[in-house]
Image: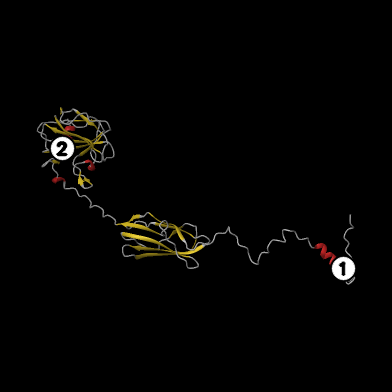
Amino acid sequence: MGDPAVIRPNASLGPAALVVAFLLAAASPAPSPAASIEPRASGGASFDPSVPAPAKRPLASQLSASPRETVAGDALPGLRFRIRQRGVDRVQARIVVVRLPRNAAIARIPLGWVKTGTSYKAPWPAGTRLPAGRYVVRLHVKDSRGRTLRRTARSPGRTRVIVRGRKAPPPPFVPAPATALPASTPSPAGPGVFPVAGAYTLGGSDSRFGAGRRGHIHEGHDISAAAGTPVVAPYAGRIASVDYQARGAGEYVVLDAVDGRDYFFAHCVRRSTTVAAGAAVAAGAPLCRVGRTGGVGGAHLHFEIWMVGWRVAGGFPVDPLPELLAWARR
C-alpha cells in the first residue's frame, strides 16, 4: 500500500496564503460525472408546456332570451350570456337588439368589462319597449388586444325574439231585452213532467235563458241537482238523437215529443243514457242522469225547448222557465 497523499507547502507562498488555499480546496465539492455533461440553462424563465396558449378570439358559449316569444306590453324577455376565451380573464361586451327586416337598432346594452367563464344577466335599459315584430339579439365582444367575437354555427352569439301583438278583448255581450226573447207557451199535450226526478234548484240569473255567454246567448235553463239524479222525459215521444260532445254539451239526449216540440237534455253522466236514437218513450221515462260532462263546472242539467225542431232550418229555442215553473207546481 502506498503512502497517503500529503499537501506540501509551496515555498513561494506565505503561511497565511497556504491556510486560505487549503480551506478553499476543502470546501469545493468534487464535480459529479453527470453534472459535467448537462448543458447549462440560459438566463430567464424556462418554458412550461402545461400552460395553454391564449385563445386567438373570444367565443359566446351562451346567449339566450327567455321567453323567446312574448306579447307586446308584457315583461321583456330575460337575456343571459357567457363568454369564454382561454387564457383571458376579462373582455369588453355589449348587446344590440335590432328589429327585422330592416335591422333597425331598438336597444343598445353596454356591459363593460366582464369576466370570462361567468354567466351574466343583461339588464334592459329603462323604458325599453318592444312593439310587435321579429328581433335579433346580438352579442358583441372585444378583448384587450382588440380581438372580436368568433361566431360559429354552434356559438353564433345571437338569438331571436318574437313579439306578438296583443289581441283586442272581445266586445262585452249585451243580451237582448227580455221582451224580445221568445217564451214558451203551454204545451198542447197538457201538463208535463218536471225533467229532474229529485231535489233541484233553478239557479240565478246566469242560469236562465238569454244569459250572456262567450259569442252567444244561453239557449236553455240550467237546473242544478246532485250528480246521478235521474233525468226524465216531460212528454211521450221518440228519441231524435243521443250523442257526446267533449267540450260542449257533454253527453246529451234530444227528444222529439208528441206536442210538436223538441227537448234537449245536456251534461248527463257519461254513458248513463238509457235510450237510443229512434226509441219511443213515455212521459216520465228515464233518459239519463244529471252530470257535469262537457264544458261545465258543477253538476246540472242544461234543458232546452225548441220550436219547429232542434237545430233544423226554421227551428228556434224558447225560454223554458214558464214550463218548468208550471211542471214544478204539479
Query: What residue is at 51 percent from the left and 63 percent from the top?
Result: 90
Q: Pointer 1: residues within 10 angstroms few (<14), some, or many (20+)?
A: some
Q: Which residue is mark 1?
A: 18
Q: Nearer the viewer, mark 2 or mark 1?
A: 1
Query: What residue is at 16 percent from the left and 35 percent from the top?
Result: 263
Q: Quadrant of the C terminus?
A: top left
Query: What residue is at 86 percent from the left and 70 percent from the top?
Result: 17
Q: Is residue 19 left or right of residue 115?
A: right
Which of 160/186 is in front? Answer: 160
Q: Quadrant of the N terminus?
A: bottom right
Q: Give residue 305's mark.
A: 2
> Label 2's element?
strand
Query: What residue is at 12 percent from the left and 35 percent from the top?
Result: 261
Pinpoint residue 3: horizontal percent, then vertical percent.
90, 58
Q: Is residue 120 left or right of residue 43?
A: left
The amino acid beneath tag 2 is Ile
Which of 227/198 is in front? Answer: 227
Q: Dividing the picture into quarters, in which one does residue 40 lie?
A: bottom right
The amino acid beneath tag 1 is Leu
Pinpoint residue 298: horizontal percent, then vertical percent.
28, 38
Say whether disc 2 or disc 1 marks the residue closer to the N-terminus.
1
The answer to whether residue 112 shows anywhere in this view is no
Q: Dividing the picture into quarters, in which one does residue 310 lie?
A: top left
> Label 1's element?
helix
Pinpoint residue 25: horizontal percent, then vertical percent.
82, 64
Pinpoint residue 193: horizontal percent, then vertical percent.
17, 30
The answer to whether residue 18 shows anywhere in this view is yes
